[in-house]
Image (tube, rainbow, N blue to C red):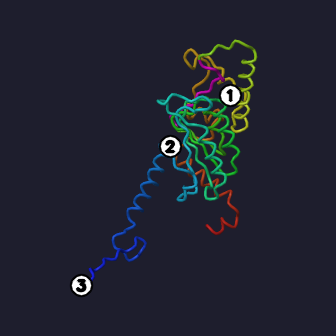
Amino acid sequence: MNEQPHEHKTVSPTNPSQPNQPDKPKKQDQNKEGSSSLINKIQQMGQTNVPQMEQSNIHCMTIVGQIEGHVQLPPNNKTTKYEHMIPQLVAIEQNPKIEGLLVILNTVGGDVEAGLAIAEMIASLSKPKVCLVLGGGHSIGVPIAVSGDYSFIAETATMTIHPVRLTGLVIGVPQTFEYLDKMQERVISFVMRHSNIEEEKFKELMLSKGNLTRDIGTNVIGDDAVAYGLIDEVGGVGAAMKKLNELIEAKRPKEEQDLVQ
């Protein structure tokens, strides 16, 4: 009798005993995808997503370059897009793991309505927030700088205070002037409510002649901003973090404070 040839049985890929089906490549691919997603977020927004911030109870938000609002700026401009800021601020308010917000500014200003919207949202957060001006907090950056519960400015940082204006356009109709005048009043009102500077002094700095070449306004440096009552204190990152931790601790319920002690 002829013997039947030996049949080689194949093992199903789902068989856990199969030695040639390692799952490492899948994990590596997942790690690569996660890393790529994180890099994209950093490139697009300058920071990681708020819900992933699990190692700290403080979220740091940076506002740098020019604040981009309703008009898209050229790609070579360093910008902070307000449509990126708004969902992050909402996430900070909703995330129970985030207990405080540190806002770091180094901005030349930008879109007035967008900047004022960011300032209003920061001020309306129920959680403690501290603002720190590093380098500069110019133009519409001024309301953002004072929107926190406490504000700091670096010793060498500057803040330019000037009226609301439309760069490169001639105001030809009364309605346009009235619109700008009302917008300027909104900015002044916000700064008055969130700082200790007197309205007359702020308007004096805003309309001062000779401080800015061929323009009106004032360039205020660290100590002067504190002396005028615009900013609370001169300090850097360490001082800002210390103050924010104090505000967080003061806001915690007494029972939690006793447990921490």
Query: Of the residues tagged 2 and 3, which is closer to the observer?
Result: 3
Residue type at mark 2: give it. Gly
Q: Residue 210 — which label?
A: none
Residue ID for mark 3: 2
- Among numbered discs 1 and 2, the one appearing first in the sequence: 2
What secondary structure do most residues of the magenta stretch adopt?
Answer: loop
Residue ID for mark 1: 202
Name which residue lies at 52% across and 49% down.
48
Residue ID for mark 2: 46
Is 100 located above or below residue 153 in the figure?
below
Residue 162 part of the magenta-drawn span: yes
* Rendering quarter of residue 10: bottom left
Give 190 or 211, whichever is nearer the viewer: 190
Outermost residue to the left: 2
Name which residue lies at 67% across and 37% down.
117
Magenta extent: 155-167
Quadrant in the picture for the C terminus: bottom right
Q: SS for tag 3?
A: loop
Quadrant in the picture for the N terminus: bottom left
- Among numbered discs 1 and 3, the one appearing first in the sequence: 3
Name which residue lies at 48% across and 50% down.
37
Marks 2 & 3, CB-CB < 8 Å contact? no
Counting from the top left corner in percent of width and height, residue 124 is at 71, 45
Residue type at mark 3: give it. Asn
Task: Characterize the local packing of mark 2: few (<14), some (14-19) or many (20 or more) Cα atoms within 10 angstroms.
Answer: some
